[in-house]
Image (tube, rainbow, N blue to C red):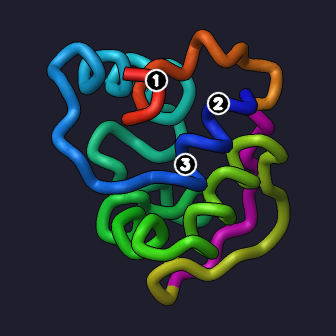
Amino acid sequence: MKEVAAAVAGFVFVALPPACLAAGAELYATHCVACHQAEGEGTPGIAPALAGTFGTRVADAAGRDFLAQTLISGMSGAIVVQGQRYNGNMPSFAALSDASWRVSPITC
């Protein structure tokens, strides 16, 4: 999990090889799609959309740190995203091994 925190915290926009994109899609399908949906549109009242918001988060260091910490620690309680209120619980993914996170520019 240390690698994913470093990968998100140090994220830069680069073209990833197809194998990395496939690994990222598999990781998303396994751990994220149930709440954030296939296209990242989220689930009303439970999980916010990632589509349309993720790019703004990774654009600066504070946003990347926030994303890394969210993956490691999870999140619970009320938040507002794109003007909509959510009150759900996102689990921590700290139990996943570093080897399972092979989708960043650092590990691909």
Point out the image quarter for the C terminus.
top left
Of 5 and 72, the residue lying toward us? 5
Q: Position of residue 53 (x, y in %)?
A: 39, 70
Query: Which amino acid is tagged 3?
Result: Val
Q: Quick check: is 91 in the magenta stretch?
A: yes
Q: Residue at x 29, y 21 (%)?
A: 20
x, y percentage for residue 22? 26, 18
**22 falls in the magenta region:** no
- Tell me the quarter of the picture where residue 105 sits: top left
Numbered circle sitting on residue 107: 1
Q: Which mark is residue 8?
A: 3
**Circle 1/circle 2 CB separation < 8 Å:** yes
Residue at 77% x, 41% y is 72
Secondary structure type for disc 1: loop
Which residues are the magenta region?
Answer: 84-93
Residue 48 % position (x, y): 52, 63
Please identify the quarter of the rendering in which residue 47 is found: bottom right
Mark with earlier residue (1, 3): 3
From the image, tell me which residue sits under label 2: 3
Amino acid at dot 2: Glu
